[in-house]
Image (spheres, grey):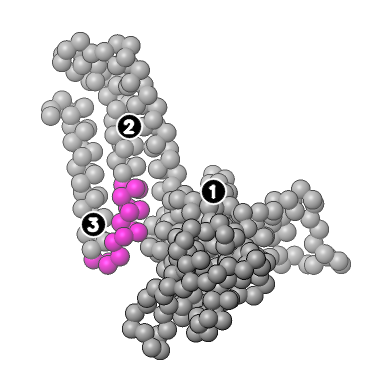
Amino acid sequence: MKFSIYRFNPEHDRKPYMQPFEIDLLRTDTMLLDVILRLKAQDPTLSLRRSCREGVCGSDAMNINGRNRLACITRVRDLQEPVVLRPLPSFPVIRDLVVDMTRFFRQYHSIRPYLINDEPPPAKERLQSPEDREKLDGLYECILCACCTSQCPSSWWNPDRFVGPAGLLQAERFIADSRDRATDERLDDLNDAYRLYRCRTIMNCTEVCPKGLAPSRAIEKIRLAMVKNSV
Amino acid sequence: MVKRPVSGMRAWLVQRASAVYMLLFIAYLLAHFIVDPPQGYAHWRAWVLSPTISLAASVFFGATLLHAWVGLRDVTLDYVKAAPLRIGVLATLMFALSTAGLWVLRILWVGQS
């Protein structure tokens, strides 16, 4: 199977280049990550992040044939050859397929991804009905892999000011949480021309999310919550 | 936290509200032209300048200009980054849209083209 992989080592290379690889698939090569690790045995300088190998850590998010996916849950035999592997679009490249996630995490932290409740804590835990807990489904499962944010054109054009789909999904996770008491502040924080409202409902985010989440739906819910909150 | 001279939610609502009104007005316009097409210029002019239609049309153009302002402002905020250029583009936009708006009002209410 033929591969074309993005290579860039800032210590040696002046510019990035695409390196061709070829390898015979073994019966045990089910997922793309299996093959990449065997390619790394061919060329040990090839750099990538990977950890859980089961699609829950988000480390091996990369651009595979033009689409952001997790390499460990992408079936290698389903891919069209030559398989083109590139780092996540628009993120600064540290080396080869490893990108700098600092800006992504800064946006995530800017929405205050923690429960804010200054009421005196109860003896055991802050209770939540099953119905209220259901509101968090589709929001808490995000693994912060950045597939969505790095496929979002609005994030490309305004990476420092637009929070991005992942951050906004997590913002909705706390806005929707019945135990949180800072809804007004959260909504107010997102109400300017950039933080949320760069979103044009392009919906690349929902299309590429490897966990099947829908950031566009979360963003729409935030918009409606803002309107209801202000009227 | 952040200074907010440029609103998010208000612009978004204006864009959607204006779109709904424009849709309704255009639908009415099409229905009217199918059911009762204008018979010549004089008939058309009288219909446009009738109080109901000229009011509805003024609101329609107001909605169009607001809608255009929000849309073009969004494009400018996305692609025009340098502050002086951005201010120039937005100011030109503002003048152009205001001129178009005043021109429409002149046509409909002062009776000149």
Do marks 2 and 1 both belong to one polypeptide chain?
no
Q: Residue at x 31, y 60 (%)?
A: B79
Say whether residue B74 is left or right of residue A58.
left
Residue A70 or residue B100, whichever sits in front: A70
Within-10-Å neighbours for mark 3: few <14, some 14–19, many 20+: some
Within-10-Å neighbours for mark 2: few <14, some 14–19, many 20+: some
| Residue A155 position by quadrant | bottom left
Q: What predominant SS class does the magenta segment belong to?
A: helix
Most distant residue in the bottom direction: A11
Q: Does any portion of residue A22 appear in the rendered image?
A: yes
Q: Residue at x 40, y 43 (%)?
A: B15
Amino acid marked by disc 1: Glu
Nearest to the eye among marks 3 and 2: give it. Answer: 3
Say whether residue B56 is left or right of residue A25.
left
How far is the residue under mark 3 from the one under mark 1? 29 Å
Question: SS of the residue at dot 2?
Answer: helix
Residue pointed to by mark 2: B59
Q: Does any portion of residue A161 appear in the rendered image?
A: no
Indicate the chain on which mark 2 is placed: B
Question: SS of the residue at dot 3?
Answer: helix
Residue pointed to by mark 3: B89
Label located before the other in sequence (3 or 2): 2
Whether residues under marks 3 and 2 lie with C-beta atoms below 8 angstroms apart, the answer is no
Residue pointed to by mark 1: A220
Q: Residue at x 47, y 61 (%)?
A: A81
How far is the residue under mark 3 from the one under mark 2? 25 Å
| Bounds of the magenta segment | B69-84
Amino acid marked by disc 3: Val
Percent position of residue B60, x then y = 32, 31
Instruction: Verify whether residue B83 appears in magenta.
Output: yes
**Relative vertical location of residue B66 with respect to residue A47 in this rendering, above or below:** above
